[in-house]
Image (cartoon, rainbow, N blue to C red):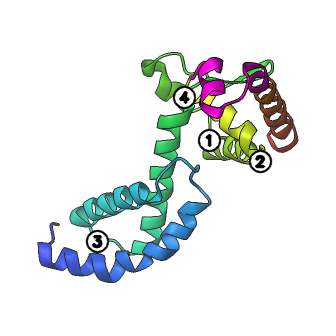
Amino acid sequence: MLYSHDRLDDWFEAEVKIHEPSLRLFLKDKLPEQMDISDVVQESYARIIKARRKELVKSPKSLLFTIARNVTTDLIRKKYVSKTISLGEEELFDVVSPYEEQKKLQEYSFDDINLLQDAIRRLPPKCRKILLMRNFEDLPLKEIASRMKISVKTVEAQLSIGMKKCKKYFEEKGDK
């Protein structure tokens, strides 16, 4: 059942938009630093409006937060899971081709992605930045060294430290 534009606007303001402050707080802990909360909020709004146009939404707040969580998962998978993160002998999120990506992603849960985020968040800032530039931006060691105004040897050492700490975190917190 379609709803008129005016009724949809009123519904959105009264039932959805009022939850924006709590939604932003919720997303603050879920998103990596590089992702913009406003983008997730806007995409969540677009999806909930699309849902409302199709049918009556009985619990707008619950649906909004579920949609936001799903948008976050989609963005994380799109941005991070398509990369290979090597943690010693274990290859994590090794996606060979775009065609195999969907099949491979099904093996990893939101908890796996959260575990990865937590491991990276716990690294010292310099170490975290180097690990992200190397593994997620695919920057060469020389480029990282140049950007951070440090030696290539320091980059190598920090990268090694970061990988070891992530591996240890996974061993302690992950399902073995």
Q: Amino acid at mark 2?
A: Arg
Locate residue 117, reporting x and y percent: 67, 44
Question: In this view of the protein, can residue 173 be seen by the observer?
Answer: yes
Disc nearer the start of the sequence (3/2): 3
Viewer-side label of 2, 1: 2
Q: Which mark is residue 109?
A: 1
153 in the magenta segment: yes
Q: Nearer the viewer, residue 33 or 170?
A: 33
What type is the residue that disc 4 sits on? Glu
What kind of element bears circle 1? loop
**Kind of residue at badge 3:** Leu
Which one is in front in this view, the residue at disc 1 or the one at disc 3?
1
Residue 88 drawn at (x, y percent): 80, 21
Disc on res. 132: none
Q: SS class of the residue under badge 4?
A: loop
Question: For the point 47% across and 43% down, which residue is it?
Answer: 75
Whichever of callouts 2 and 1 sits on the residue coming sooner in the sequence is 1
Q: Position of residue 37 (x, y in %)?
A: 47, 58
- The residue drawn where x is 71% and y is 29% is 150
Circle 4 residue = 137
Give the label on residue 122, or none: 2
> Quadrant location of residue 41?
bottom left
* Residue linked to disc 3: 56
Left or right of 79 on screen, residue 119: right
What is the spatial separation of the Cα atoms under label 3 and label 4, in whole angstroms?
42 Å
Q: Residue at x 83, y 36 (%)?
A: 165
**Mark found first going from the N terminus, 1 or 3:** 3
Span colored in magenta: 139-156
Binning the other alpha carbons within 10 Å of mark 2 as few (below 14), some (14 to 19) or many (20 upward) gives some
C-alpha span from label 2 to label 1 = 20 Å
- In this orientation, which residue lies closer to the viewer: 73 or 56? 73
Quadrant of the drawing holding the N terminus: bottom left
